[in-house]
Image (spheres, rainbow, N blue to C red):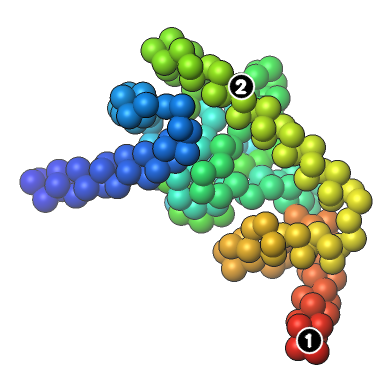
Amino acid sequence: MELNVKLMDIANHDMAKELQKLLTGFPMLSEEDIQLIIDHSNIQHYKKGTILLKEGEVSKVCYSVLKGIVREFYVVEGDEKTTAFYTEGMPVNSFSSFTNESPSRHYLVCAEDCMLVVGTQSLEEEMCRRIPKLESIIRKEIERLTGEAQDDFASFITSSPEQRYLNLLETRPDLVNRVPQHQIASLLGITPESLSRIRKRIFSKKMVN
């Protein structure tokens, strides 16, 4: 029993350290603010393959990734169409479902073993009451993410498949080795065979240069 308690204490300490690293990215938060958030945070471990949200469900919680990858996908005529990967430091939310209490159109699933901060609307409101500046931080973060999503969509529409893959290698190189290639292909809007040809072409160019 004593060993189990010690192991649990170590695990809780490690989770708190990961959250602290994430929160220190917001310099407007004081050490006291950060500790208060940590003390009231719900950090959970999820096994690879855990479905966090299904199509048709109403999202009741939001997440932030401390460790691992969460994959977002839609099911179209029986096929999974990957639309996003959320990695360390990124928020995960079905915004329309969470905000409007409407059924989700997509799935969220753990693509690796994950350590996630789990949030609710009531907890967010409580923390904003305790830390008034938090409301402004959250609003600015949502604005930033919305802008990034718009830029990413514009880049996707105006780029060739090879340009999309090169951009992925430049901006998120970790994904290439962490998720299956057929999911990378789906994210890029191409077939696995097309991705294989693109990778060979890029490799050949590097060998020539």
- Badge 1 crowding class, 10 Å Cα cut-off, few under 14, some 14 to 19, many 20 or more, is few
Query: Which label sits on residue 93?
Result: none
Residue 139 visible within the image: yes
SS for dot 2: helix
SS for dot 1: loop
Task: Give the amino acid at mark 1.
Answer: Asn
Residue 132 left/right relative to 192: left
- Residue 123 lies in quadrant: top left
The residue pinned by badge 2 equals 139
Q: Residue at x 56, y 18 (%)?
A: 136
* Contact? badges 1 and 2 (CB < 8 Å): no
Residue 40 left/right relative to 111: left
Query: Which label sits on residue 209?
Result: 1
Residue 52 left/right relative to 36: right
Q: Residue furthest front?
A: 27
- For the C terminus, the image quarter is bottom right
- x then y, percent, for residue 44: 39, 39
Q: Measured along the vertical axis of the image, is residue 53 above or below residue 197?
A: above
- Badge 2 crowding class, 10 Å Cα cut-off, few under 14, some 14 to 19, many 20 or more, is few
Front: mark 1 or 2: 1
Residue 57 visible within the image: no
